[in-house]
Amino acid sequence: MGDFRILEVKQSVFADNDRRANELRQRLREKKLFLLNLMSSPGAGKTTLLTRTIELLGGELKIGVMEADIDSDVDAERISKTGARAIQLHTGGMCHLDADMTAQGLEGLETGDLNLAILENVGNLVCPAEFDTGASKNAMILSVPEGDDKPLKYPLMFSICDVVVINKVDVLPYFDFDLEKCRKNILARNPNARIIPVCAKTGEGVEEWAGWLREQVKIWRS
Amino acid sequence: MHELGVVFYVIRDVKKVAEENRAEHVESVTLEIGEVTGVVHDLLRDCWKWAAKKEPLLDGAELIIEEIPAVTHCESCGEDYETVKYAKICPHCGSDSTYLIQGREFNIKEIGVT
């Protein structure tokens, strides 16, 4: 046995992931591939919004989707039906995706001819916010039944998102959800957030969301 | 939270440092964890015990956790205050133009090796 000694490390555990995420973002920029990281609670409507989005943008953009879940492939199956390329990523129990897993997923998706790749992150408002995936932009969906106080409870998630989609606005009359209060709560955490109320099921407001995404892809690729 | 996932990152980084320094065995790992990272210390320790056992270099290594208190700074009056006690609104002037200056750290401070 050697002598006991202390080695100073002084290193952030997240620093390594941040570095890998920045490298991935750089590679995506060179390849002119826009990567959207879509986050939300389970059941907020990520897959439904994505099918609508593909219907609206599929004609002008070549879209691929990575569905991250702890298990099953029901989401990838739903997306495949739209004609977009879809793969399922199993996180093996992990509650989020990091930059390495995202890079591996992109390889599996064979992005050569794609302009827009969408990562549907694990349904969770805590962990995915901590790990930069290397995406071009972060988006999240908050659905009306979850309540207008979610930005107060999960401040980090709301502070890292470029856009917050408020989904299921068709049920607003049945819930104590104050859209203006919610807007204020979001902007207090993130003054730059774009807020788009939609109903993915009926299609209401989805044009505005698709317009935002179209514009971001254009800027990224120019 | 993602205690187990974080433990895997810590193990990867600690192994790298230990190998670079030609250590025979890691005896202890000291982490600095911010008060508002959301990490549950007991759960982190349980995950650590389970995962470190699988690595001969780390088997039995003690996990030491040092907590860094969360502090928020107020842009309006310039004062700092305890985040957990007062949250987003400054207790000195009532402003909500405040931001966290420490408390989200998750650092490997040092490791004890033989």
Image (tube, coloured by chain):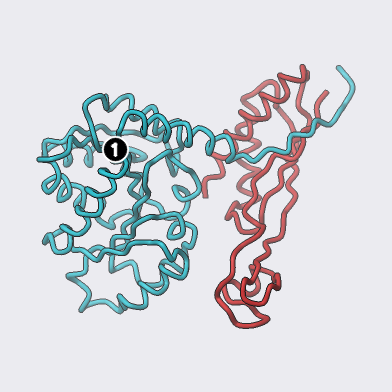
Chain colours: A cyan, B red
In this view, which residue lies farthest toward the right?
A: A3
User: Residue at point 33% right, 38% down?
Assistant: A71
Q: Is residue A183 left or right of residue A210?
A: right
Q: Amino acid at mark 1?
A: Arg
How many numbered markers are drawn? 1
Image location of residue B25, percent across then percent down = 76, 22
Q: Which residue is mark 1?
A: A221
Q: Residues within 10 Å of mark 1 (few under 14, many from 20)?
A: some
Image location of residue A48, percent across then percent down = 19, 51
Q: Is residue B73 left or right of residue A3?
A: left
Q: Is residue A152 left or right of residue A168?
A: right
Image location of residue A47, percent across then percent down = 22, 48
From this view, report whether residue B61 is shown above or below residue A146. above
In this view, which residue lies farthest toward the front?
A: A222
Image location of residue B85, percent across then percent down = 65, 73
User: Residue at point 37% right, 77% down?
Assistant: A181
Disc 1 chain ID: A
